[in-house]
């Protein structure tokens, strides 16, 4: 019988992470969230009522100015020709008395700019608050 020396087992240090404290912290946080969640108050919403819905806007009145200086208005299916800006303003005041409808000026491209501005100024002086200019989109021509 031969005697063999007894081998000693060497103890190695294990490089493992201890996760028990992390589990404890997570459980505490879970309990805190479960307790505080029912205590959170929701805000009160003020929803609009059915009667407060704004009505759709009426289409604008289109005032057309041609190269002869003739004023023509189109309001829906109605088309009228006016002799001068004063007649146009009188018609607009009777029509816009109940509604605050927009007025759009559509002038021919050959009409002098001063004529268009004279009509715009006359409309502003007549206290018609919503006046605009109608433009057509055209691609620029190459010279």
Image (cartoon, rainbow, N blue to C red):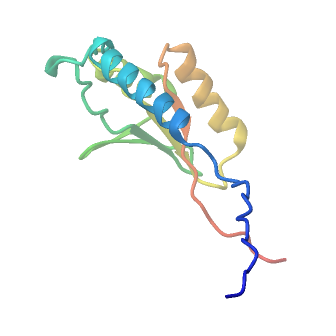
Q: Quadrant of residue 3?
A: bottom right
Closer to the camera in the image, 105 or 111: 105
Query: Is residue 38 shown above or below 63?
Result: above
Closer to the camera in the image, 65 or 23: 23
Residue 90, x across and y down, in percent: 39, 20
Residue 24, x across and y down, in percent: 47, 30
Q: Is residue 19 left or right of residue 5?
A: left
Q: Is residue 71 visible?
A: no
Query: Is residue 125 shown above or below 82?
Result: above
Q: Quadrant of residue 92?
A: top left
Closer to the camera in the image, 40 or 49: 40
Query: Is residue 89 shown above or below 110?
Result: above
Residue drawn at 23 percent across, 47 percent down: 77
Query: Is residue 42 shown above or below 118?
Result: above
Residue 28, x across and y down, in percent: 43, 24
Q: Quadrant of residue 72?
A: top left
Residue 137, x across and y down, in percent: 59, 61
Q: Is residue 113 visible?
A: yes
């Amino acid at each position: 019988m031969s005697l063999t020396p007894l081998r000693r087992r060497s103890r190695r240090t294990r490089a493992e992470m201890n996760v028990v404290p992390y589990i404890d912290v997570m459980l505490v946080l879970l309990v805190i969230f479960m307790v505080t969640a029912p205590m959170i108050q929701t805000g009160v919403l003020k929803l609009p009522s059915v009667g407060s819905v704004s009505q759709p806007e009426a289409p604008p009145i289109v005032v057309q100015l041609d190269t002869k200086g003739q004023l023509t208005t189109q309001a829906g299916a109605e088309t009228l020709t006016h002799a001068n800006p004063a007649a146009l303003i009188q018609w607009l005041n009777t029509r816009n008395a109940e509604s605050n409808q927009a007025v759009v000026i559509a002038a021919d491209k050959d009409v002098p700019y001063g004529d268009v501005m004279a009509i715009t100024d006359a409309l502003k002086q007549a206290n018609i608050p919503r006046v605009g200019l109608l433009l057509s989109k055209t691609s620029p021509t190459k010279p």
